[in-house]
Every structure is written in C-alpha cells, then in structure tokens.
Image (spheres, helix red, strand yellow):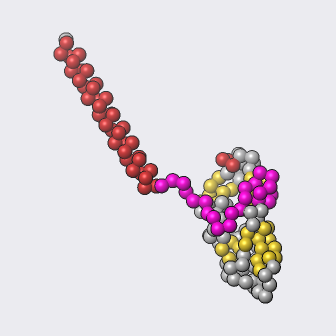
Amino acid sequence: TRDGAFKIDSNGQLVTSDGYRLMPEIILPPDVKPDSLSISQDGRVTVKFIGSDEDVEIGQIEMFRFVNPAGLQAIGENLLITTNASGEAIGGRPGFDGMGKVRQGMLEMSNVNVIQEMVNMIVAQRAYEFNSKTIQTSDSMLATAVSLKR
C-alpha cells in the first residue's frame, strides 16, 4: 500500500487507515507517553516511555520497490499486488538502495483538482462540438455550391 495514514488500533499495533497491520508488526508497549511516537526518514519507529525522555526504538518500517512498478495490480482501497509484470518485491530500509524516504506527518494526496478538470473537459467538449458544426456547415455550403454550378 501507499497509504501512509497510520494509526494505532485497540491492541496497540500500528495499522493503516483501513486497519491493515504493517509487516513486520509494530506494537506499542502500554507504558508509552501519549503522542511520543516518532518515525524517522529511514523508517525507525521510536517512542518515549512514561518517566523517561529517551527515545527507544520499537520497530522498523520497511519499504519495497519493483523492477516494473507499472506492472503492479491495483485491487482497491489503495492496495497493490505483485504480478509477473511487476516482478518480485525488493525490500529495504527507507532512504537506502533507491528506496524513498518516510515523511512523518505528510500524506500523498491527489495532484488533480477534479472540479477544474471537469470544467476543462466541458470547455474542450464544447469547442469540439463547435468545430464539428463548422465543418458540417462548410461541407454543406460546398455541396450547395457544387450543385449550383451544375
């Protein structure tokens, strides 16, 4: 998945916004300070325990890349599965060996304004209709001119 909106479920596990567990699982101990969870750019997950200001690593987020990312098959809910076209998953730590970096507090959003694109599509469709009618009128006028000449 590319869904980076992680949350903590009722069992203290780090999960996606749809409730899918990360692999490998990352479980928060019960005696963690609220809001102390931190994820570094290289995927290390750290927390601070109650009574301590020291960061303690409790897990590592892994990333995967593919020889042909376009070959992945979307199965809905922001999930992808491997196919023969995509090749096998190549795992690694974020920030190393061509893997991307993790950005805590950031979400990848659509870069398309749907309303503006709909307006653009309507404008293009009307221009196409206008051009089509212009060609039809021109063709009709040419046919009339040819028939008058005879």
Residue 105 colored in magenta in the image: yes
Q: Is there any visible trace of residue 91 in the rendered image?
A: no
- Give percent across and percent down for residue 54: 81, 79
Rendering quarter of residue 134: top left
Rendering quarter of residue 100: bottom right
| Front position in the image: 83 or 2 | 2
- Residue ID at (69%, 49%): 69
- Give percent across and percent down for residue 38: 73, 72
Q: Quadrant of the C terminus?
A: top left
- Residue 126 position (above or below residue 91): above
Q: Quadrant of the N terminus?
A: bottom right
- Residue 143 position (above or below residue 130): above
- Give percent across and percent down for residue 135: 31, 29
- Residue ID at (76%, 77%): 47
Seen from this angle, which residue lies furthest front? 53
Q: Main secondary structure of the magenta part?
A: loop
